[in-house]
Image (cartoon, rainbow, N blue to C red):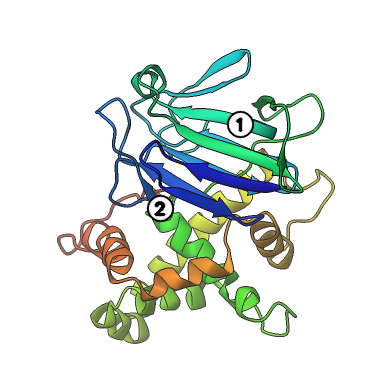
């Protein structure tokens, strides 16, 4: 299967199996779409999979439409955590994606799934959490969240060394890696010297890991009888393209690192002395 995404202005991108493309009015997207306010800045996602392409709405404000031969379906806004309620799966052929205005003005994205270079008649269907033939909603992690950074640090040893010879990091290791990745060296000194601060930050990471495990189970990515050890959970995240080797490049992206620094340290650690708070772990 080959998946490609094109715009009315002539931009195009070809997706390798397991890769994903984020689109919207920008700027924190892979493909910037010139559209009116009916399309969000971070509007949707196209994920290339072995059996076709999965399309999801990532906006919490706007609906996204998918149109093909004989159908038009509305993908509802994502939930408060940014998770899509369901997606649209294109097995083969061409689908048009965008806001209602984009479809009416013929400005929609064109998502094409080809088999051996040949585009066939379009076959598509809704992919929900209890799809009739066993297809489940893929798990998507927004790179602009703390949860994604934790997942990336958790998976990093296996992404760098697929043989699995390098042990996976534990909670304090992930917390330290997050500090290093965001350039928070002032907090890193505190982390090494203040056991209370280290324990609080490690506990925060543990909550994120708990959320990742829950999401894996909710999406049906692990069997009910499967023990979800750290090794199994990390391999699921990698094997399903939720975290990829290409994501390691974000660690060298100043804009992404700056955003993560704001999320982790400006928003959660700067507070009056003696004041405690509950963290929202999924953002």
Give the side of residue 231 with respect to residue 181, left or right.
right
Q: Name the residue under label 2.
A: 30
Asked if one can make out residue 87 in the rendered structure from this viewpoint, the answer is no
Q: Name the residue under label 1.
A: 94
Asked if one can make out residue 113 in the rendered structure from this viewpoint, the answer is yes
Distance from disc 2 to disc 1, alpha carbons, whole Å, reads 20 Å
Give the side of residue 19 with respect to residue 82, left or right.
right
Q: Name the residue at 68% across, 24% down.
A: 125
Q: Is mark 2 on a helix, strand or loop?
A: loop
Q: Residue furthest right?
A: 225
Give the side of residue 86 with respect to residue 2, left or right.
left
Query: Residue 184 versus residue 273: which sits nearer the camera?
Result: 184
Q: Residue furthest left?
A: 272
Which quarter of the figure has residue 127?
top right
Which quarter of the figure has residue 184?
bottom left
Instruction: Point out residue 231 in the picture as x, y percentages from the top left corner.
Output: 72, 68
Query: Is 283 located above or below residue 8 in the figure?
Result: below
Which quarter of the figure has residue 23?
top left
Query: Is 250 located above or below residue 173 in the figure?
Result: above
Query: Residue 210 versus residue 155: which sits nearer the camera?
Result: 155
Number of numbered tags placed on the structure image:
2
Q: Name the residue at 55% across, 58% down.
A: 209
Query: Residue 171 versus residue 249: which sits nearer the camera?
Result: 249
Instruction: Point out residue 81 in the picture as x, y percentages from the top left corner.
Output: 43, 39
**Few, some or many C-alpha atoms within 10 Å of disc 1 (few <14, some 14-19, many ≥20)?**
many
């Amino acid at each position: 299967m080959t998946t490609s995404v094109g715009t009315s202005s002539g931009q195009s991108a070809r997706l390798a199996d397991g890769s994903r493309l984020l689109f919207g009015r920008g700027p924190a997207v892979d493909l910037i779409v010139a559209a009116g306010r009916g399309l969000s800045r971070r509007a949707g996602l196209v994920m290339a999979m072995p059996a076709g392409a999965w399309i999801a709405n990532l906006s919490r404000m706007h609906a996204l439409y998918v149109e093909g031969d004989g159908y038009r379906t509305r993908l509802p806004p994502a939930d408060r955590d940014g998770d899509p309620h369901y997606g649209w799966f294109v097995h083969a052929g061409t689908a048009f994606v965008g806001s209602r205005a984009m479809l009416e003005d013929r400005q929609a994205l064109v998502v094409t799934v080809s088999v051996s270079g040949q585009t066939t008649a379009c076959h598509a269907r809704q992919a929900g959490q209890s799809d009739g033939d066993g297809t489940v909603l893929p798990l998507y992690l927004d790179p602009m969240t703390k949860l994604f950074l934790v997942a990336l640090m958790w998976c990093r040893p296996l992404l760098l060394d697929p043989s699995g010879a390098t042990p996976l990091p534990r909670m304090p290791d992930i917390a330290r890696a997050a500090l290093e990745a965001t350039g928070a060296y002032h907090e890193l000194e505190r982390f090494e010297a203040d056991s209370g601060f280290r324990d609080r930050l490690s506990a925060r990471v543990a909550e994120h890991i708990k959320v990742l495990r829950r999401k894996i189970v909710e999406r049906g990515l692990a069997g009910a009888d499967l023990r979800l050890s750290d090794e199994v959970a990390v391999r699921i995240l990698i094997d399903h393209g939720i975290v990829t080797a290409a994501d390691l490049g974000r660690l060298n992206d100043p804009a992404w690192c700056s955003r993560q620094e704001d999320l982790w340290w400006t928003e959660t650690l700067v507070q009056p002395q003696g004041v405690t708070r509950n963290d929202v772990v999924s953002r």
